[in-house]
Structure formats: structure tokens, C-alpha cells
């Protein structure tokens, strides 16, 4: 499944999607612009939005999403989380005590319901419904 197809599936679920840069041949797709503007290496390759006002432009509209990916088919998928998408994200980093933190949260509040989907070779995601 392509990232465009994944973005369209997310949109059908009510998740507001937007395009992220991606890593191609070991470099972020923003690197050419960064090189032209003497900005150095991208600090977050493939993990940042393709435009600044992504919070406002993230959408569930299929035509707008297709237009985003038409400008660059290599884009990764971003989801504007929070109440609008009815999704929250909890990033558990085991290298920095994340497992202990999540265990403490689960003991205090109960198990966190979440879903994980592998959507093709390039895209995989895990999310929790927003209550
Ligand atoms: Zn970049």
C-alpha cells in the first residue's frame, strides 16, 4: 500500500492527514532546499511536515489529500492528532525509562486501548482512540 492510500484510509477513519518529508537514498527530501539555503543537514529526516501551516491544512478531504501527494508521491503520512482527529499519541521510549513509565500509568489508570496497523512496506502506525 502506498502512503497516499494509507492517508486516504486514515481520512476515512476521521484522522486529519497531511504530507511529511521522506528519506530518499539516505537523505531527507528537504535536503536539496536546505543545501541551496545553507541550512545544514536535516535534523529530523523524513519526520517533519512538508509545509509550515500543517495544523490548519491537515484534512479528511480525499481530493485535498490526493493533491498533497500529487506534488510529491514520496511523502510520508502525518496525522494531526488531538480532539479533531479523535486520536492521542503516547510515545514510549524504552531507552529512556518509557516502559517503566507506561507500566506505572497502566497500574494507575488501567490498560490503554490502542491499535497498530502495518499499511504496506513503507507505512506503519499505532494509535489510540480519543475519549
Ligand atoms: Zn528534512
Image (cartoon, rainbow, N blue to C red):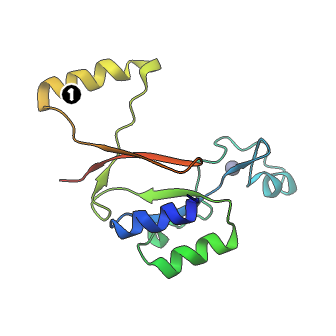
Of the pair 71 and 51, the residue shown nearer to us: 71
> What residue lies at 49% left-to-right and 60% top-to-bottom?
6
Q: Residue at x 13, y 32 (%)?
A: 109
Q: Secondary structure at mark 1?
A: helix
Residue 52 locus on image (x, y percent): 58, 64
Quadrant housing the N terminus = bottom right
Circle 1 Cα neighbour tier, 10 Å, few/some/many (<14 / 14–19 / ≥20): few
- Is residue 91 toward the left or the right of residue 30 in the image? left
> Is label 1 within 8 A of ligand 1 (CB to nearest ligand atom)?
no
Q: Is residue 97 above or below residue 129?
A: above
Q: Give the x, y percent position of residue 114.
A: 28, 43
> Which residue is outermost to the right?
36
Residue 27 quadrant = top right
Between 117 and 66, the one nearer to me in the picture: 117
Q: Residue at x 37, y 56 (%)?
A: 81
Q: Residue furthest bottom?
A: 63
Residue tagged by mark 1? 105
Q: How many marks?
A: 1
Q: Is residue 46 left or right of residue 25?
A: left
Q: Tell me residue 84's x, y (percent).
A: 30, 65
User: Is 84 placed left or right of 48 in the picture?
Assistant: left
Judge from the rendering whether residue 61 lies leftward or rightward of residue 41; answer left or right. left
17 to 117, vertically: above or below: below
Q: Position of residue 17 (x, y in %)?
A: 46, 64
The residue positioned 66% from the left and 74% from the top of the image is: 70
Vertical placement of residue 111 versus 78, above or below: above
Amino acid at each position: 500500500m502506498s502512503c497516499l492510500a494509507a492517508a486516504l484510509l486514515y481520512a476515512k477513519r476521521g484522522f486529519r492527514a497531511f504530507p511529511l518529508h521522506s528519506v530518499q537514498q539516505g537523505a531527507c527530501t528537504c535536503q536539496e532546499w536546505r543545501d541551496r539555503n545553507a541550512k545544514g543537514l536535516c535534523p529530523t529526516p523524513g519526520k517533519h511536515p512538508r509545509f509550515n501551516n500543517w495544523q490548519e491544512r491537515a484534512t479528511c478531504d480525499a481530493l485535498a489529500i490526493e493533491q498533497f501527494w500529487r506534488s510529491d508521491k514520496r511523502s510520508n503520512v502525518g496525522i494531526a492528532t488531538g480532539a479533531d482527529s479523535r486520536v492521542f499519541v503516547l510515545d514510549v521510549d524504552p531507552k529512556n525509562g518509557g516502559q517503566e513509565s507506561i507500566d506505572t500509568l497502566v497500574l494507575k489508570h488501567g490498560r490503554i486501548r490502542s491499535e497498530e496497523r502495518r499499511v504496506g512496506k513503507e507505512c506503519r502506525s499505532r494509535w489510540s482512540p480519543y475519549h
